[in-house]
Amino acid sequence: MALDRRAGILLIAIEIIMIPLFAFQLYYGRDADPVALKAKSAHLSYYPMFQDIHVMLLVGFGFLMTFLRKYGFSSVSFNFLLCAVMMQWGLLMQSLFKGPGITIISLIETDILVAAVLISFGCILGKTSPIQMVLVAFLEVPVYLLNAHIGDKISVSDPGGSIFVHVFGAYFGLSVSRILGKPKCNNLEATSYTSDMFAMIGTLFLWVFWPSFNGIFTNTDDEQQRAIINTYISLTASCVTAFAVSILTDSNRKLTMGHIQNASLAGGVAVGTVTTLVIHPFGALIIGVGGGLISTLGFVYVQKWLERRTGLHDTCGVHNLHGLPGVFAGITSAIVAAIATQEVYGPRLFLIYKARAPEAFTSELKEIQHQLIQVLPGEDRSALGQAVYQLLGLAVTLVVAVTSGIFTGLILKVTSRWTGIVPEEYIHNDELYWNMEQEDDKKPRTLELETDSNNRLNVV
Amino acid sequence: MALDRRAGILLIAIEIIMIPLFAFQLYYGRDADPVALKAKSAHLSYYPMFQDIHVMLLVGFGFLMTFLRKYGFSSVSFNFLLCAVMMQWGLLMQSLFKGPGITIISLIETDILVAAVLISFGCILGKTSPIQMVLVAFLEVPVYLLNAHIGDKISVSDPGGSIFVHVFGAYFGLSVSRILGKPKCNNLEATSYTSDMFAMIGTLFLWVFWPSFNGIFTNTDDEQQRAIINTYISLTASCVTAFAVSILTDSNRKLTMGHIQNASLAGGVAVGTVTTLVIHPFGALIIGVGGGLISTLGFVYVQKWLERRTGLHDTCGVHNLHGLPGVFAGITSAIVAAIATQEVYGPRLFLIYKARAPEAFTSELKEIQHQLIQVLPGEDRSALGQAVYQLLGLAVTLVVAVTSGIFTGLILKVTSRWTGIVPEEYIHNDELYWNMEQEDDKKPRTLELETDSNNRLNVV
Amino acid sequence: MALDRRAGILLIAIEIIMIPLFAFQLYYGRDADPVALKAKSAHLSYYPMFQDIHVMLLVGFGFLMTFLRKYGFSSVSFNFLLCAVMMQWGLLMQSLFKGPGITIISLIETDILVAAVLISFGCILGKTSPIQMVLVAFLEVPVYLLNAHIGDKISVSDPGGSIFVHVFGAYFGLSVSRILGKPKCNNLEATSYTSDMFAMIGTLFLWVFWPSFNGIFTNTDDEQQRAIINTYISLTASCVTAFAVSILTDSNRKLTMGHIQNASLAGGVAVGTVTTLVIHPFGALIIGVGGGLISTLGFVYVQKWLERRTGLHDTCGVHNLHGLPGVFAGITSAIVAAIATQEVYGPRLFLIYKARAPEAFTSELKEIQHQLIQVLPGEDRSALGQAVYQLLGLAVTLVVAVTSGIFTGLILKVTSRWTGIVPEEYIHNDELYWNMEQEDDKKPRTLELETDSNNRLNVV
């Protein structure tokens, strides 16, 4: 069995070990300190958007994954478990990079980090036990933070996390899945009418709140407003495109729920790298159409091709929703960066692309700081230089994600004696993990029949 | 079939055509412009309420319509599609009336406009193909905007949109439905236990967030707070009344889920015209009871009568939830307008009823502006005059909605060769539009039986 | 039958009686008055958190209770009805304690009061008619307010309401349930795959928005930020612990959905009394682990033991989620109060523990007020004294809740001729209350069979 006494002990052990780690490493940040905070807290204004993201993680991702007919309990609950464990581990690991003082900002950054973990989780859903998934997540978080830290150091701009969250999470999870191999028996890898309906709860909450995900961390109010507008428009475009492409690629000219559930969200990923930029409403529309197109084609052609040719099995189609649109977003960000001028943005350009600011102690910097005090010294990077760095950020992320994912997959294989293997016949099957006495009456049973006075057979 | 290659091509064509339209017509408003916005943006404070409304459209309306047993995929997904297409079309069309600069305010106004479209959609749900619905929506939006513009010009006060959103959307959709005619075969027009449960997700999110819908656009903070309080109270009253009337009108003294799902929301519609006014808590209660009563009686008596006598088929009972309570709201608004005095409201009266402000260059205006600088010159309309204009606004809306709805219905009929007709046997049936391989095992099948040693027949 | 004409008449009568009561007792508070409110309203900033709580009541509690296989309609709808009636009654009753002027603050306080009623409702779900539940709720509200008032008077600190909402609601409801007795026939007290999935909607929204419930009413911004951080951490801990203990206590080492649905939330209850205090992140973690542990053990051992030994039947396991973790929270609050020093909190200590402030007209008070003007005169209570009062608050609440619950249960018994009794065979059965024609085709039916040419029997 995939769950045993050790699974329970491991989880409780994690909590017990967390206590001293929390005690030594984490304390309340200045903003949450009764003595340090003198006036009003600016951080509280983040709370409504934070809650939107919180809904996305628990309800959005949780229900989006319930599309499998016999794996609803596990999908929504293991997503829940992963969120909870990784919120703790994320707070801890993050404090190594950003300092031990916790405020709402830390919770938000942790939530975003957890999103990457949940994306990876979608690749191996149903094929791995919860203990394996927790192990994967523990390994993923520090690599995620390291990669994001590199991106920050080389000043890659990615306000919606398309590169550092979506591409990273997707290719990390896909690499783990590739190492674990393709399930031989997957006759439960199907949906039911009800499970597809539950999945739409996830889709809709993700779609509705995505502007908060892409727009929560911005330097200025105009950036935040553009983030909201661009994401809103891009999502409408990917939704319409997903419907169109789903019909056009189907031999019966019918729609497929899986495309609607997922590809309609691709606009949120695709616009994530440039969400705060002046891409204009029509630019957001083009990006959304591109995202929806790539994603739906991914579901229809790429996924099957990859599975057949490379043995890559991707339960939720993460590659189509997060991988391909994320790469598209990375490339888009290079194009947008190459044409971003100070004429359009004014001095706020240097808040978005920090490295493009003039170097320290130059008169150019002084002049710009005179206009906008928040601009920090940069490295006088050119627009084209920024474009190259955007692509570099994408490339680094791909390399780091795939390498660490393979490594993590190998660790899973080596430790499978302890972490457990899901038996082939229980893949995508809740019965492996859950007490389900309630399903007794649905099992096939022998019908007892008898003949009535009209010589008709009746069920007794 | 109702979906074919043309449906996919049409949707992708819409997106392609939208790109130049967006490029030429829409740009970021001052508030989202990196150079124009100097300080903090006031528009961002609308964001939490905007998200509530966004949830109402996608999750609220989307799931409310999933009550049909075999039409859940289509209900929630075509609602999703309509939202996405109409958010684009709405932004465009609206810019003709309000200018091309987009901010969060534009997104909110578009969302409210989309609500009207979704209301109409409820009338023809299951009887029209998604392409027909998109066509209807494209035609509806400019008429909606024109009618709202007229209302604005003649200073009709309707902060919650009961007249301009609910009455308009309902009677437009009903007129379309009337022209299309009553489905002959409607044996799938029934609910299932699970579909009724899904519909409650929609009901509850609509109920919870309705105060945001009624209170998002207000002139002052006291107005907004009254909008929230009045809607909260009115909704509780319509909920309790719906339960009461559902029991009392049933021959078995049992409740009907359809009444609870819909009529409990009627208080939100009924109070919408006067939501910011000083109707006092007891006034909100009376209006909520009235709305719940009218709505439930509509479901029990009016809907069947209309269907039998006039051949009007209304899938979701839109007339009962949006039509009748909307008319009630219009009449209520006249009564409330007739008794509104400057004594109660102070100079803020002239922010609510703009035409009641004194005319330009009068000393009365000068005096009021001295107290409240925001008051603009009006036309010195009397309280009774305002009441008459409220009724006029309702009448104009009814005429415009019915006329344009009939016209739209006729266009649908004329173009049915291109837009497709839903075959009678596929009305309210997801199988027309969706790949549903997962349902194979539920189809009726030949039972193989054999006799066992006890001479009893067993299923093999 | 449990519903009859009287049920409908009662509900409509409640509304009619509410109208004059509202008219005489309630008016708009200063903040919602067009003449009184001069500048911006501070109360509107509460709105997003208020909406979170609103979602918790209607969607959270509503769907959490839908876990029963045949009681989904009733669970979610009667929860809805109770919310609506009690929001009216709560506004009224509350005005007796806090004054008749209504603002958003009143709506929030009413929502919190309704939470206590819904907790009690969970104990008697399925065993009582909606009319009985409304009667129970009408009696519960004034006692709730009285008890909370006592707590206020003796300065018990309980920002998240663990004592005054959770302990009160749980033991009140349990006492009512104990008097009503254990249902003899409970073969419908089971879940189905779908009903367990619906219940997870409730769990997740409660989990996500719980920080708003615990953090809405705070004195300062640092308090609010700690409330959010502490609740976030505590909830992650109770979630992980619930999974661990569910596995470890199961003989098959499988998980039980009921534990995950409920015990994962226990951290929110457990941390409620000290949510604004400086318990440090590790303290929140310990409390969450404790809450999750107690709650899951409650489900596995205590509930069955109580039912067997004392005849206490608790449909939703309210004792395990709200009762035991609430008592744990009360004890925790005494410990935390005993070690709270002015060194850690500065003068803000006296905003949290009002009675610890120096007495009026003392020089100590003057000095503190010099640092923080909002501090009011207290009674110079010591830290240990505050700890004792925290336990006293818990004890008083237990006594008041049990006594008034027993009393209410006896009233139900005495009035059962009028309020109706749920027939044993209809316990936990929607069919008692709802028109369910849609379920016809699921009922067992006579199969008509005929022999085909291969001499096999086919279903006609």
Image (spheres, coloured by chain):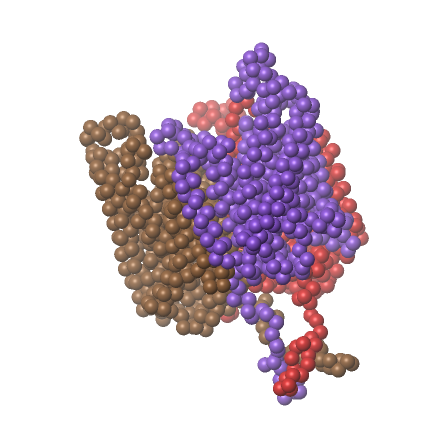
Chain colours: A purple, B red, C brown
Q: Position of residue A31 (x, y in %)?
A: 41, 31
At x 64%, y 50%, the residue is A180
Position of residue B27 in the picture relative to residue A23 (left or right): right
Q: Nearer the viewer, residue A268 or B44?
A: A268
- Seen as rendered, the residue at the extreme bottom is A453
At x 60%, y 17%, the residue is A358
User: Toward which corner of the image does residue C299 lie, by quadrant?
Assistant: bottom left
Q: Position of residue A230 (x, y in %)?
A: 63, 34
- A236 up-or-down from C328: above or below: above
Q: Nearer the viewer, residue B124 or C162?
A: C162
Position of residue C87 in the picture relative to residue A158 (left or right): left
- C426 up-or-down from B302: above or below: below
- Seen as rendered, the residue at the extreme right is B417
Position of residue A177 in the picture relative to residue C310 (left or right): right
Residue A378 visible, this orientation: yes
- Seen as rendered, the residue at the extreme left is C362
At x 77%, y 49%, the residue is A248
Position of residue C288 in the picture relative to residue B317 (left or right): left
Q: How many marks?
A: 0
Q: Position of residue A301 (x, y in %)?
A: 75, 48
The quadrant of the rendering that contains the C terminus of chain A is bottom right
- C2 up-or-down from A188: above or below: below
At x 51%, y 34%, the residue is B45
Residue B234 visible, this orientation: no
Q: Position of residue C38 (x, y in %)?
A: 40, 31
Q: Nearer the viewer, residue C354 or C434?
A: C354
The quadrant of the rendering that contains the N terminus of chain A is bottom right
- Seen as rendered, the residue at the extreme top is A363
